[in-house]
Image (cartoon, rainbow, N blue to C red):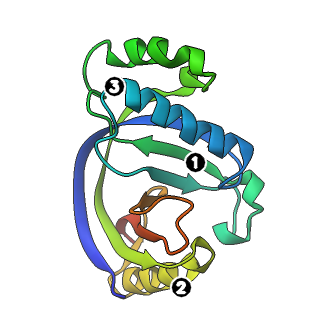
Amino acid sequence: MSAELVSYGPVTRLSVSGVGEPGGAEHVSAVGALYAVASAMGGASGPLEGLWWVEEDGPPLLVARERWRWHLLLPAVEAGCAGALERAREAVRASGAAVDRVVVSSFTEGECVEVVHEGPFSEEWRSLAVMEAFMAERGLVAGGPHHEVYLTGLDDPSPRTVLRQPVRRA
């Protein structure tokens, strides 16, 4: 596994924000809402993504998972079209999904360090260590929330995940 330096311009995604552990009730509800709205917009046009951070000092992986903060993101066919979000919410409101939590977000990450992690989420720390060493060698520090792109389903027994960290010069 090796890290690389990449750059990302502006993107537009459906988004839901929350606090709590991955796979917890709030997280699962948010994922369901995203897919329900995306389905009504013509479907997802890419994989589920997550921006993750903590609002406490110290190593993020040592913070209790119920205090992790996140934005879940999903590219959708019509995400940038005027009125599409409102129409999609109304179309699936009866499903019971928390569709009013879904918003459209646009952002630019710029320069990032990236690695593809293959294996359980509980082992991501190994890939994160590779990224941290890569950053240190180049005089880079974190410049935004940790970003994950889920190349396989969250329930896949052998997940593949792009780990991305926006960076800036130290």
What residue does disc 1 label?
Answer: 70
Q: Is residue 71 above or below residue 110?
A: above
Look at discs 1 and 3 and give the one toward the viewer. 3
Judged left or right of residue 117, residue 157 is right
| Dot 1: element | strand
Front-most of residues 156 and 164: 156
Earlier sequence position, callout 1 versus callout 3: 3
Residue placed at 39% from the left, 65% from the top? Answer: 164
What residue does disc 2 label?
Answer: 126
Q: CA distance from mark 1 to mark 3?
A: 23 Å
In which quadrant of the rendered view does residue 12 lie? top left
Q: CA distance from mark 2 to mark 1?
A: 21 Å
Amino acid marked by disc 2: Arg
Earlier sequence position, callout 2 versus callout 1: 1
| Dot 2: element | helix
Front-most of residues 26 and 6: 26
What residue does disc 3 label?
Answer: 41
Q: Would you say residue 104 is visible in this rendering? A: no
